[in-house]
Image (cartoon, helix red, strand yellow):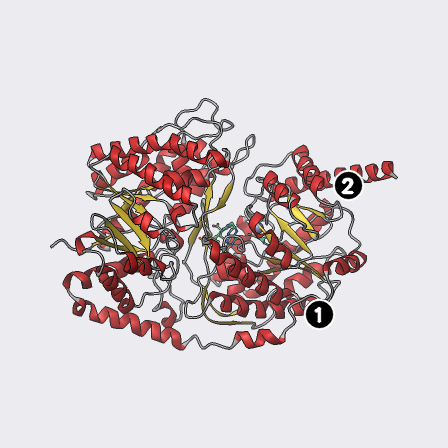
Amino acid sequence: MMSIKSSNLGYPRIGENREWKKVMEKYWAGGMEEDEFQEKMKEIRLQHLRKQQDLGIDMIPVGDFSFYDHVLDTAVMFGLVPKRFNEYGGKASIKTYYDIARGTKEAVASEMTKWFNTNYHYIVPELDETKPSLIENRPLQLYQEAKRELNIEGKPVILGPVTFVKLSKGYKKDLFRTVVDQYVPLYAQLLRELEAEGVTWVQIDEPVLATSLSREEVDYFQEIYKILTESAHGIRVILQTYYESVDDYQDIVSLPVHGIGLDFVQDDGENLNSLIKYGFPEDKVLAAGIINGRNIWRANLEETFSLVHNIQQHVADDRLIIQPSSSLLHVPVTKKNEKKLEDNIKNALSFADEKLHEISIIKKGLDKGITEIQNQISDSKRAIEALRALQSTTDAKSKEAELSMERKEPFRVRRQLQQSFFQLPLLPTTTIGSFPQTPEVKKQRSLWRKGQIDQMQYEKFIKEETERWIKIQEKLGLDVFVHGEFERTDMVEYFGEKLEGFQITELGWVQSYGSRCVKPPIIYGDVSFRAPMTLKETLYAQSLTLKPVKGMLTGPITILNWSFARDDISKYEVANQIAFALREEVRILEENGIRMIQVDEPALREGVPLKEEKKEGYLHAAVNAFKLATASVENETQIHTHMCYSNFKEIMGAISEMDADVISIETSKSHGELIHALEESTYDKGIGLGVYDIHSPRIPLLNEIKENIERALNVLDVHQFWINPDCGLKTRGEDETISALQVMVEAAKQVREEVTLQKALRS
Ligand SMILES: Nc1nc2c(c(=O)[nH]1)N[C@@H](CNc1ccc(C(=O)N[C@@H](CCC(=O)N[C@@H](CCC(=O)N[C@@H](CCC(=O)O)C(=O)O)C(=O)O)C(=O)O)cc1)CN2
Ligand SMILES: [Zn+2]
């Protein structure tokens, strides 16, 4: 009898020590020629394949590796290079590839946005300008490389046509089907070429299958995949879904493919329910996601084993594949180099490598009998029990009931009071919080971490940097200042370091976009306030200027979504615990005279569940947590919030309910959409629309910013409107930041004059 196979859906790109990031950034900085870059990248790529082989994975993905982002890879593979980067068409060079992602002096980068409900970002393909063709068969090349170099029979991973088009822009939504049809022959050709090479298995990712789809869309899958599988009979296609259950289980498992990949972890039990209820087609393979690809906790192997056992009741062993629930892109590489974690926490963790090891253990148990893995099962249970012992739960709910969740007066009253308190000019200018984390800032922090400079020297440096930037802000003529966040590595990691209930890893990095990584803190226990977290830096900055300095906090939902949260209590309970702690920080700031406080919620949008029926509950909890953190302040205290990334339309209602006095949002690259959303809404509070893109080093032109402002003023009251960049400036260089802000302030000044003149003329 053939046995169960183990598989992986995608492996982290960044490397144990972020080698991938370092190679890429060095190449960008001109520190390496393309040949060396290619060589180094290949080394990393092969090392990752070898590792998966050593961990005993039968079906190793190829093509999941990328030089930046797999959606961009797919676009470039189909020749979709916007004309502004390569007017002559043809194959994109490495330079062009990075230009699309990062922009050039002359051309703005393609838009970047969130990948489903994750903190990973992809580059949005622009379909409008170019007729697609299969320029190069990337999965084929990577398959050949794995075979040639390591004798690995790889499993090419391809982003499927429906998801690809759905994530793209540059076509009318009602032409969706027509556009997908353009791609189907190209995918067919791609598969035929893989078939000719002797490829056995292909994984085609269609994560849109885990969202709420219309009947029509589900029917498309039927037609499209029929064409695809018929064009390459010899190849076995696994249609892969993840991050949620599939709604139309019976239709989806009957699609004309050889295998279906289902997530049995992030599905609230729905996929297993459907499997039990409807069974599984006898002619298909089930690729079952059984180890959590989105979290970092060690699996209780007894439970995992019994999950597989349940699945086995409906699928024969020779048609069963076990794998993580999603790509491991979302978790750090390995815990083995962590030296500072508390033993009982480290022992309960499982990063990418450890997860693949867990898959191999389960496979061994299935092959040789459960007694063969009894020790590992016991170890896993003991590790989790020891973790539970650290996690005592307070009753967050009862605390919440005693607290006021509403501001004292409604916005229309607060607005007047705040205006007389702050006396801000029309169209006030501000920034989102962080200023450049220059190599010098990172170096000082690194020296301090290593103990090569002491706490006092480090704090002195942070103060000097803050002071320098207060002066720069004065000189620029901004209206509302920030302290610059120089003391923070990452916003979420910083609060994780200060709050009770968190552990910080040394090397637990995860790719967020391009070469940029984050180190999500781990929420293992009850979260609570320990000591003021932002007071010292804020008060220092405020002491240097008469302009208001915004207090700068990260909101509860963002801290939750950008951490790895404990899974023994509901995530909303965790959010409320964080909110209580922030409420205390807000109180202390206010008490010390900080009367503008920004509570960032950039991750609110990404956390919206993929399924329609779960959205309302999430948004309700998110609004609740935000209000819990902020509603206690006086009427004159102005609460700001900030969100980056577009697609606000469906959450406009929730944004309004948060009852922040001012919100700043990213719009520079998706201006039209937001303006449209605002046209249709009754949003009446302060709103700062990002007037330039901070993800690109390009300095915006005066007229571009003016146009952005003027267009916004067509739908917004001039008294509502603030002027700010799209997001924080920490990733930018110092000179480019100052130049861009100069242009922004000048644009604000000119529009202000125009508005005042128009008013005078009218009266
Ligand atoms: N968590 C989170 N998610 C987010 C965002 C965010 O700000 N935070 N913003 C949005 C966009 N995503 C982003 C993600 C990462 C970064 C980013 O800048 N990351 C930095 C790391 C930031 C950091 O923690 N830096 C540390 C460690 C820096 C470092 O690498 N140090 C060197 C040593 C440097 C030296 O000695 O000179 C090393 O360890 O090797 C520090 O400043 O202390 C990077 O990848 O470069 C920006 C935006 C959405 N999601
Ligand atoms: Zn932002």
In the drawing, does residue 692 fall left or right of residue 104? right
Residue at the spot of label 1: 591
Residue at the spot of label 2: 752
In the drawing, does residue 566 fall left or right of residue 539? left
Tell me where residue 289 appears, x and y as whole percent: 31, 56
Amino acid beneath label 1? Glu
Q: Residue at x 16, y 66 (%)?
A: 369
In the drawing, does residue 623 fall left or right of residue 56? right
Secondary structure of residue under mark 2: helix
For residue 250, say whether it is visible.
yes
Is 763 located above or below residue 96 in the figure? below
Secondary structure of residue under mark 1: helix
Amino acid beneath label 2? Arg
Q: Residue 351 is drawn in which quadrant?
A: bottom left
In the drawing, does residue 97 fall left or right of residue 282? right
Q: Residue at x 56, y 61 (%)?
A: 620
Label of residue 713 in the image: none
Q: Residue furthest top?
A: 88
Q: Residue at x 44, y 62 (%)?
A: 564
Tell me where residue 414 appears, x and y as whole percent: 75, 60
For residue 69, say whether it is visible.
no
Q: Residue furthest left?
A: 1
Few, some or many residues within 10 Å of mark 1 (<14, 14–19, 20+): few
Q: Residue 33 is drawn in which quadrant?
A: top left
Tell me where residue 41 appears, x and y as whole percent: 34, 41
Q: Residue 568 is drawn in which quadrant?
A: bottom left
Image quarter (top left, top right, bottom left or bottom right) of the N terminus? bottom left
Tell me where residue 13 appears, x and y as whole percent: 36, 48
Few, some or many residues within 10 Å of mark 2 (<14, 14–19, 20+): some
Kindly report the distance in space between the C-alpha atoms of the residues bearing marks 1 and 2. 34 Å
